[in-house]
Image (cartoon, coloured by chain):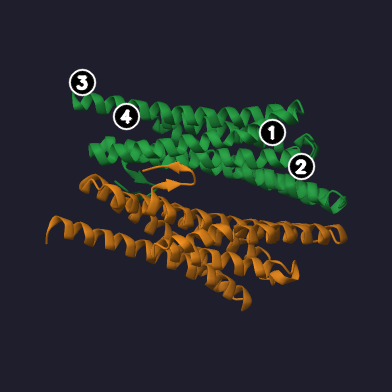
Chain colours: A orange, B green
Amino acid sequence: MSPRTVFEHELKELKDNVTTMGLRVEETYAELFLALECRNEEEIYRILKSDRVVNEMERNIESRCLSLIAKQQPVARDLRTITASLKVVTDIERVGDHVSDIAELLIRLNMNPLSSYSGHLEPMVKAAKEMIRAAIEAFVSRNEEAAKDVIESDDIVDDLFNKVKQDLIEYLKKETKNADECIDVLMIAKYLEKIGDHAVNIAEWELFQETGEIGDTRLL
Amino acid sequence: MSPRTVFEHELKELKDNVTTMGLRVEETYAELFLALECRNEEEIYRILKSDRVVNEMERNIESRCLSLIAKQQPVARDLRTITASLKVVTDIERVGDHVSDIAELLIRLNMNPLSSYSGHLEPMVKAAKEMIRAAIEAFVSRNEEAAKDVIESDDIVDDLFNKVKQDLIEYLKKETKNADECIDVLMIAKYLEKIGDHAVNIAEWELFQETGEIGDTRLL
């Protein structure tokens, strides 16, 4: 194989690894809320234990990116692809962390359905899930338009967070004996909002892949 | 100048940039809580506006790191130094973000002293501040022992977070009319805890600089 063919093969492998890591986090997110629906606490403990795998995937991809940059001295589009992968895994891994954070809180809440605290939580779970799915899809398929859509959709999750917060404040004012539960639920909403923020970052790394720019700043 | 001398000069500049960015975030943190003490709302608005500067510093350092890796093909210790800088700026920038998040909440709380909500908040502000200072110092001066101390000290901030949370729950149970304030204060405590987490990451990047390992994983 020519050096260029070897390099292209390595780039393809890198892309496959990022895809696998992204899908893995998406799946864990879906499994978590499915486990909540079925009140399957055992499954939630399994999800908590599996977070380590995603961290290992991140390290593995970072290591590949660095060795590709050092050995192949890529330029232009190739360098942007590798750099974007090196950065995007941080955001994907943080989503995984927040899924674990939520899992811990769901156990503490005795697997109570989220809808019992605020009618805006289930729409928020759905909206954040869709943002993550769309962001990873946009990154992997290098779809600029789809990435821009994700960035625009961030307001939906932010608005829902404020609505959940308002509901919890009203709930607290009426009934204080469940104050600690309310605070845990608020934290869940905060983690969902953060997941939306990371989806926006992932979409921004897709735009960077194409243009070398992040927001208004030229990086490469 | 020989190519090696040029490269060493560039590495020195990179290190200076990371130091400047770290000090800048440390300073902003200190200024924020000083402004709260003096109830100087104008100063807090100034701090909010200045967050952009730190983001630009991050992009600038990332851009330098990538161009150094691509042009100089560094190996071993040099590659670890550059990679660590590329990753550590993400954590420093997030600390800056959380300082801004806290600034917004302090304005919403009408600059009320944090001690009026929980006696554990001021110790938490001090502990997180010390963690960030020590972590940046350990990274910049390449001090492995100091980095390990930072990693061990994370429990202090985590414990204080739980105490603040407990205080707020008690407060809420007695008096619900300030529920929205309580929730804002809880968020401030959460951001302080997150700042402690980023200090731990910064300390881990120092260890990586020396060893090429992050936790139990060999990265380079």
Q: Residue at x 29, y 53 (%)?
A: A64
Classify mark 3: helix, strand or loop: loop
Calculate the distance from the C-alpha at mark 4 to the C-alpha at mark 1.
35 Å
Task: Report in which chain the residue with disc 1 lies.
Answer: B
Task: Report in which chain the residue with disc 2 lies.
Answer: B
Classify mark 2: helix, strand or loop: helix
Q: Residue at x 23, y 23 (%)?
A: B5
Classify mark 4: helix, strand or loop: helix
Amino acid at the residue labelled 2: Arg
Name the one closer to the observer, B17 or A154. Answer: A154
Question: Which callout, 3 or 4, points to the residue nearer the camera?
Answer: 3
Whichever of labels 1 and 2 marks the residue nearer the N terminus, that label is 1
Q: Which mark is residue B45?
A: 1
Calculate the distance from the C-alpha at mark 2 to the C-alpha at mark 3.
55 Å
Q: Which mark is residue B108?
A: 2
> Horizontal and vertical percent for residue A33?
59, 71
Question: Which of the 4 image quarters holds residue A197?
Answer: bottom right
Q: Which residue is mark 3?
A: B1
